[in-house]
Image (cartoon, rainbow, N blue to C red):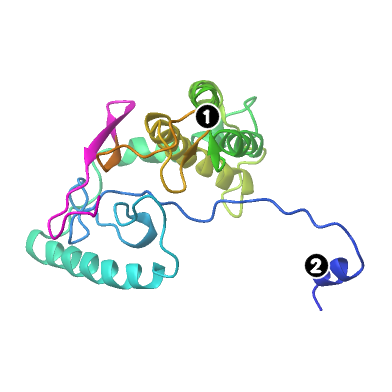
Amino acid sequence: MTPLIERIRAGHAIEVAPAAHFSMGGIRIGPGGATTVPGLYACGEAAGGLHGGNRLSGNAGAQILVQAKAAGQNAARLVRTAGPGGAPRNTAELLDRLHAPRHQTGGPVPAEVKAALTGLAERALSPVRGGETLDAALADLRALAADALPRLSLRTAERRWNRDWFDALDCAAAVPVLESALLAARARRRSIGAHYRRDGAGEPDGVLSHGIIRRTGATLDHCFVPVAFPLAEPVP
């Protein structure tokens, strides 16, 4: 018997709370899994565009198998015809960014920044959203990214099994994902599917659209792109 079951049977209180375990968004891909980045393919739950206002249950396996086959075949075909692309031109810059926290001192501990990011997401991106909360979270996130993120410092410079280093990398990856989610939730002012705006009109817009996030220089920009229906028009 597991400790959790034993505690329940003994009458102890069990804390229950909602948690995110999937995303209905992801990288925009074409039919063959190609992205807008040359040579980059995506599939499965990393890819976006498959789900509409809500996520269908039980289709993750089929999604991975169908998309992974197409993406893998097309990626292999690209390598055979074009050859390997080699190392990125900015390899040195990427390595410097990767190792920067190991050589910095006096900055915030990555675990603390990671906890702040988690709290920000819980406040603003809960099942019920509001414009003021989203605006405040976006401002807090950008301030944190500008101040704390570049100063992350590890408590040890050890290269093997360094939890602080893992947390620092998690923080760097989480910031653009969180900003994308906040921008998309703020721009979609009406409730639709699993996105509920307490300050919205409560009804979805007449034109179905994808929210697209693109990076322009150092800035993330949001725009709406109408959903294409090449096979059949949706029922009004």
Kind of residue at disc 1: Gly
Residue at 61%, 49% in the rendered image:
162
Q: Nearer the viewer, residue 136 or 41?
A: 136
Q: Which residue is mark 2?
A: 4
Q: Residue furthest bottom?
A: 1
Q: Position of residue 202 (x, y in %)?
A: 44, 36
Q: Position of residue 137 (x, y in %)?
A: 54, 26
In this rendering, position of residue 50 left or right of residue 74: right
In the rendered structure, which amino acid carries the disc numbered 2? Answer: Leu
User: Viewed as shown, does residue 163 lie left or right of 21?
Assistant: right
* Magenta-colored span: 214-236
Residue 222 covered by magenta stretch: yes
Q: Earlier in the sequence, mark 2 or mark 1?
A: 2
- Number of numbered callouts drawn: 2
Q: Which residue is mark 1?
A: 130
> Mark 1 falls on what kind of element?
loop
